[in-house]
Image (cartoon, helix red, strand yellow):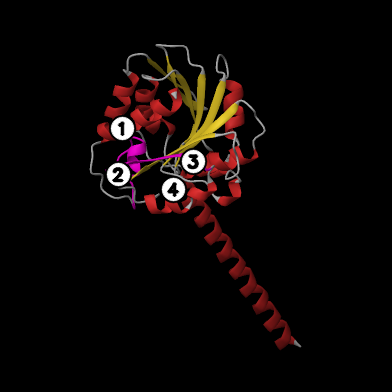
Amino acid sequence: MQKKNRKRGHAKRLLGITALVLALLLVLAVGGFAVWALNPHQAQPRALREALDTPGVEVSTTDEAVVVTSTHTPPDTGIVFYPGGRVAPEAYTAPWAEIAADSAVRVVIPRMPLNLAVFDADRADRAIAEHDGGVDEWYVGGHSLGGAMAASHLGESTDDTVVGLVLWGSYATEGAGLAGREDLAVISVSGSRDGLSDPATIEENRAHLPSDALMYEVSGMNHAQFGAYGEQAGDNPAAISDDEAHHRLADVMSGFLDG
């Protein structure tokens, strides 16, 4: 009997130790993920300074979002733009400031929980409610993971002020349910040197967008150049400068928004 009790006691201790080890591994995994997620790619200082000095454009930064607004003409179009995974909203100030210098837009780039749009795919609803003054129609969109989450949100949205989708280096999944939509203006911009959302992958997912979606590829542009935050693991080297990439992106977007 004593031998059986000793065996039971040993088994209980072994289970207790195993549970403790698993709990510690879980804590380490969660802690490691939090450290990874809470250290996003930041805006390059020079690009951010130049964006802040763009004539006809105002940039405001809060705990909730970065807002880029045209001041040369009162903005009548709004865009809620989700950042890519682990990219700070400020990193998109440079390309959007160049676009806002040409088009009358208000762009809201929200901060996401743990810098991942997957944790708040419906963030656009709150952003529109907070920034709708003077804006007649809205687009939602985003870069990379942010674009996929924006597409998912749009597929479930009932807000009739949202008229379209903007994808940069991104694509919609079948689950977004956008393929049969005839009420949306959609643009998808890819980069020929994108190593993370490469043109082939974007083309493979083309069928998940409305048939009249505008597809545009910027030759020489890579994934990170949709923002201004430096190199990104897994990306290809760009064949054009960041400034040139942003110029070409602005040309495409201004034509789309003004058209």
In the image, is 89 to the left or to the right of 2? Answer: left
Is the residue marked by circle 3 packed among few (<14), some (14-19), or many (20+) residues within 10 Å?
many
The mark found on residue 239 in the picture is: none
Residue beneath the point at 32% across and 14% down: 55
Magenta stretch contains residue 222 = yes
Q: Nearer the viewer, residue 187 or 73?
A: 187
The mark found on residue 248 in the picture is: 1
Question: Which residue, given by chain and number where applicable, does mark 2 sit on?
Answer: 231
Quadrant assignment, res 130: top right
Give the amino acid type for the residue marked by disc 4 in the picture. Answer: Trp
Range of the magenta residues?
211-234
Question: Which residue, given by chain and number where applicable, does mark 3 sit on?
Answer: 147
Is the residue marked by circle 2 packed among few (<14), some (14-19), or many (20+) residues within 10 Å?
some
Question: Which residue, given by chain and number where applicable, does mark 4 sit on?
Answer: 36
As measured in the structure, the alpha-carbon distance from the residue carrying label 2 to the one carrying label 4 is: 16 Å
As measured in the structure, the alpha-carbon distance from the residue carrying label 4 to the one carrying label 3 is: 21 Å
As measured in the structure, the alpha-carbon distance from the residue carrying label 2 to the one carrying label 1 is: 19 Å
Give the amino acid type for the residue marked by disc 2 in the picture. Answer: Glu
Magenta stretch contains residue 133 = no
Q: Earlier in the sequence, mark 4 or mark 3?
A: 4
As measured in the structure, the alpha-carbon distance from the residue carrying label 2 to the one carrying label 3 is: 20 Å
Determine whether the residue tagged by mark 4 lies in a helix, strand or loop: helix
Q: Are marks 2 and 3 in contact (CB under 8 Å)?
A: no
